Image (cartoon, rainbow, N blue to C red):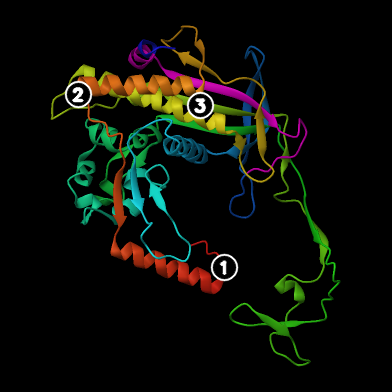
Amino acid sequence: MKLSDLRVAIQTGAAFRCRTTLQPAGGQGDKVFPPTYLGAKYAMEERILADGDGAETRRSPCVLLDSVQSQANRMEEALQQAVDANRLKMPVIEVDFSKVELIDPVGKITSLQAPHRIADAILRDSELDGIPFRKSEVGKQVDNTSNRNATPLFELCPTALIFGVWDSTGPKGGLGSKFARAIVSEIVGYDAQSGAKTGSRIDPLQIRAGAQVVINKDGTWKLAGEKAKGAKSPSEVNHGNIPPTIDDNAGGVTISRAEQMTVISMPALRRLRFPVNGEYKAEYDDAARVVLLSLGLVAATLAAEAGLDLRSRCLLWATDTLKWEVIGKPGSTPQEVQLTAEQAIDLYKSAVEASVKVGLPYRTEPIVLRPGKALIELLQRSQEIAAESGVEEDE
């Protein structure tokens, strides 16, 4: 695939799509564990599947194995690793916590790691040269971004234009600019059958439940006296047997197969305009859109290269090589393309070079922020509370 092919796809095409069949690494029939949601539930639903040439359809119980949001995070993580390894250069804003005294050091958080990308509160509450980021000359550029003025995000955080962003924590609050996702990916398991969850623990010391304990406020414990108040079973401090249990919920699933579906929307990219110094030119728009498309391909291929170890007991394996289809004009036959991560990176580098040549701004060195005083104090106090309690909180 050449850069000219990306330009044609951007100008006239509908999408790049990649559908990859997956199986559990343990083989067909091995149990896999989907993500659990409130109430220890899986995201189960019925979908209509087309068999063969699509002439016949059937209903299948399906389970979500990796959501759109999770897939986006995995692709951004793959980009971050590539940046750290100097495999590619791209605009990144990072907050450096290395000089902050913390119980659990953080290091740095970048716009590829922050949940809301450039609009995240971590960046908002940090400073550039002593000035709050969103009040700095660089940060203020984000305030007036829109589909007709995507140039500031292209320069500072192009992944916000690919994976989407809502600047709801900025100066305009809920009226802050919104950009829809241009790339969407998810992994679904077909013909899903729920399994049972079992558990037990055999204590080699054979400590009995009757030998009760009293737990102190600091988490330490002592043997309870005969009439001690608040006495608890030794299992509360992880001693003793746990009887075998069985639960019909959240016990994993078996599937006939899984499928990863990734789509990059050309219309979504065509909606974006990229003026330079207030001037609109077709060559600006074309060059910027090609960079975004190539960066999306880099993100997807790097994530595939990293593998699909989604969570404990959910390792999936692709049964075939990664293949992309370029969906062109209505009625045309999709063009099949094979693309490795290195080939995608080469395309991206050429696209960036071409965009800079026509005059588009594109930072390839990170913008380094320092956390603000209030953010430092909040983080320090939070870690103190966590260290004192030893319990993770949901909120």
Left or right position of 390 against 229? left
Q: Amino acid at mark 3?
A: Thr
Q: Foreground residue, 268 or 110?
A: 110
Circle 1: element type: loop
- Residue 231 shows up from this direction: no
The alpha-carbon separation of the residues under discs 2 and 3 comes to 28 Å
Residue that lies at the very extreme toward the top in this rendered image: 332
Q: Amino acid at mark 2?
A: Gly
Q: Residue at x 43, y 11 (%)?
A: 328
Q: Marks 1 and 2, Cα distance to the nearest angstrom?
A: 52 Å
Q: Position of residue 62 (x, y in %)?
A: 65, 34
Q: Residue at x 24, y 24 (%)?
A: 356
Q: Secondary structure at mark 2?
A: loop
Give how far across and how far down residue 157 sits, in percent.
Answer: 32, 38
Left or right placement of residue 362 versus residue 165 in this view: left
Q: Which labelled disc corresponds to residue 301?
A: 3
For disc 2, the marked residue is 359
Farthest residue to the left: give it: 278
User: Badge 2, how many Cα within 10 Å: few under 14, some, many 20+?
Assistant: few
**Would you say residue 208 sits in the magenta stretch?**
no
Neighbor class of circle 3 (other Cα within 10 Å; few <14, some 14-19, many 20+) is many
Q: Which residues are magenta?
A: 6-34
Label annotation for residue 391: 1
User: Does 236 appear above or below 117?
Assistant: below
The residue shown at (42%, 27%) is 296
N-terminal-most mark, 2 or 3: 3
Q: Quadrant of residue 11?
A: top left
- Residue 90 placement, left or right of 133: right
Secondary structure at numbered mark 3? helix
Residue 149 visible in the shown view: yes
Going by the numbered disc 1, the residue's amino acid type is Val
Tell me residue 82's x, y (percent): 45, 34
